[in-house]
Amino acid sequence: MNENTKVWAATRLLFSRREVASLLNLSVRSIDHLILTGRLQSRKLGHRRMVPRDSLENFAGVTIREPMRMRGLL
């Protein structure tokens, strides 16, 4: 994940299935399977299925959000 991708991902709360597939280097069909089997949590917003950042982080075993100290909040 390059620095621009890290900043972009750290500022987002929800990701589309296509965005999650790109971040995890998987197909959208694989993401659909992970959602269907409960390995990724998702929310339905209108006609779109969105994956919360914390679910993506839990699945991948990484933290993509910036520590609060780095953002000047602590």
Image (cartoon, helix red, strand yellow):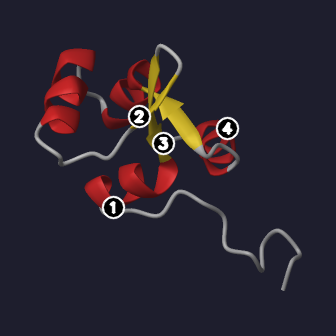
Extreme front residue here? 46
- Whether the residues at callouts 3 and 2 have beta carbons within 8 Å, the answer is yes
Q: Kindly identify the amino acid type of the residue bearing the numbered disc 4.
A: Asn
Tell me whether circle 1 and circle 4 mark residues in contact (CB < 8 Å): no
Give how far across and how far down residue 55 sits, in percent. Answer: 38, 53
- Helix, strand or loop at disc 3? loop
Where is residue 57 shown, x and y percent of the image?
A: 40, 57
Question: In this picture, is 52 found above or below 61?
Answer: above
Instruction: State the image quarter where residue 61 is shown.
Output: bottom left
Q: Residues within 10 Å of mark 3 (few under 14, many from 20)?
A: few
Amino acid carrying label 1: it is Asn
- Label 3, label 1: how many angstroms apart (C-alpha)? 17 Å
Q: Earlier in the sequence, mark 2 or mark 4?
A: 4
Q: Nearer the viewer, mark 2 or mark 1?
A: 1
Relative to 53, 70 lies left or right: right
Per the image, the residue denoted by label 2 is 23
